[in-house]
Amino acid sequence: MKEILLIKYGEIILKGLNRRRFEDLLIGNIKRALPKGSWANVRTSQAITYVEPADGANVDEMTACLQKVFGIVFIARAGVFPKDMDAILRDGAEYLAPTMESLSTFKVEAKRSDKKFPFDSPAISREMGGAVLRRCRHLKVNVTKPDTIVRVEIRDNEAYVYADAARVSGPGGMPTGSNGRATLLLSGGIDSPVAGYMMAKRGVELNAVHFASPPYTSERAKEKVVELGRILAGYTGKYSLYVVPFTEQQLAIRDNCPEEHLTLIMRRMMMMIAARLAKKSGSLALITGESVGQVASQTIHALAVTDEAAGDVPVFRPLIGMDKDEIVTLARKIGTFETSILPYEDCCTVFVPKHPTTKPTMAKVLQSQSRLDMEYWVNKAVEETEWIVIE
Ligand code: ATP
Ligand code: MG
């Protein structure tokens, strides 16, 4: 039994010249996301992308991969039949039967792009309705509010039959690569992977920066971040992770700055280093997992002071208005939560002041960091950065 996957994608930027670019990107991303050798052909026609599996391919596995490709709204699995009315009716009804078992009502919608096919759309719908009723005796037709719509498409070389009830949803959003590249500050926590996901969903290609402070942070903490990176790569395809050795910088901050501003100055240095790495890698913005008020370093006063350090590189914070439980729900949905809660330390939790300021001013923070040669420490970090490909 031959099957094909019909993919419906988002329509937001389908207007004008963008449409072709959007479709080409999506096709490329689909091919990359599918297991090697699993597809025979991927093409788009009239706002549907058709993925033809190779002989013997595992279509369940292919569908699961496609559910992570941004831009896809849903995936329908259809039976492929020769353009012979008897075959379409008999084998089509048989193919639909397992899906229809748990349903009570349906209607048929037929589409004929081959106008030479000897039956017109209303006739195909009528005949198919009859065939389904004969095969699945428990069903009734309901044209106003059916449990599912059975679709028959007569194409140039073959016919497709499927039921909407058998569709699965994709992640929505826009194809990766349709909206430039941004650099995610990836910790081992719950929030930053979700922030990366949200931006990636809008078509933003990612790379990532992680700050590690060995021996205060362990090799296992780093492996955890790499694992989170891999889960994200399941949605975005492969990307680069920059691991920044940050121990000396943190010690220098601790030894030269007033305690109340330690975290903020550290966050500022992270922003400066990340902005430098972003520019070096053709990235247009930074992404963090901060949300207003979550901790002392995330009051809007603190965020303003942190932002200043990123200079002319914009900082995107897609979680800014979300509650922790909303973020956790998303983390579970995208599959990062279980890894995020593994109990390894983060460089941000190494030298935490007992009494951090929650309303810092730029002037005071600049005063506090005046004994520190920021430029020296930023350059050193960038030079010593290690580069890992995540896939
Ligand atoms: P998360 O759950 O993402 O760790 P958080 O609520 O614990 O966030 P912070 O630890 O203050 O908050 O970090 C705020 C943001 O700074 C993170 O969301 C992340 O984008 C970035 N960040 C924190 N620690 C690191 C790190 N070690 N490497 C890279 N980025 C980091
Ligand atoms: Mg954290």
Image (cartoon, rainbow, N blue to C red):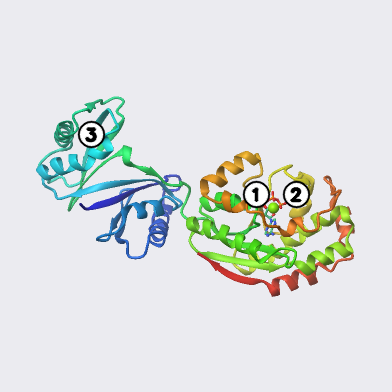
Q: Which residue is mark 3?
A: 108
- Residue 363 visible somewhere in the drawing: no
Q: Which residue is mark 2?
A: 303
Q: Residue at x 17, y 47 (%)?
A: 114
Question: Which residue type does callout 3 highlight?
Answer: Val
Spatial separation of the CA atoms under disc 2 and disc 1: 10 Å
Question: Which residue type does callout 2 highlight?
Answer: Leu
The label shown at residue 317 is 1
Question: Which residue type does callout 1 highlight?
Answer: Arg
* Image location (x, y in percent) of residue 95: 21, 43
In primary-sequence order, the first of circles 2 and 1 is 2
Q: Residues within 10 Å of mark 1 (few under 14, many from 20)?
A: many
Is disc 2 in contact with disc 1, using a CB cutoff of under 8 Å? yes
Residue 382 location, quadrant? bottom right
- Does residue 127 appear to the left or right of 320 in the view shown? left
In primary-sequence order, the first of circles 3 and 2 is 3
For the residue pair 47 and 39, the one nearer the viewer reads as 39
For the residue pair 148 and 223, the one nearer the viewer reads as 223
Residue found at the far bottom of this picture:
383
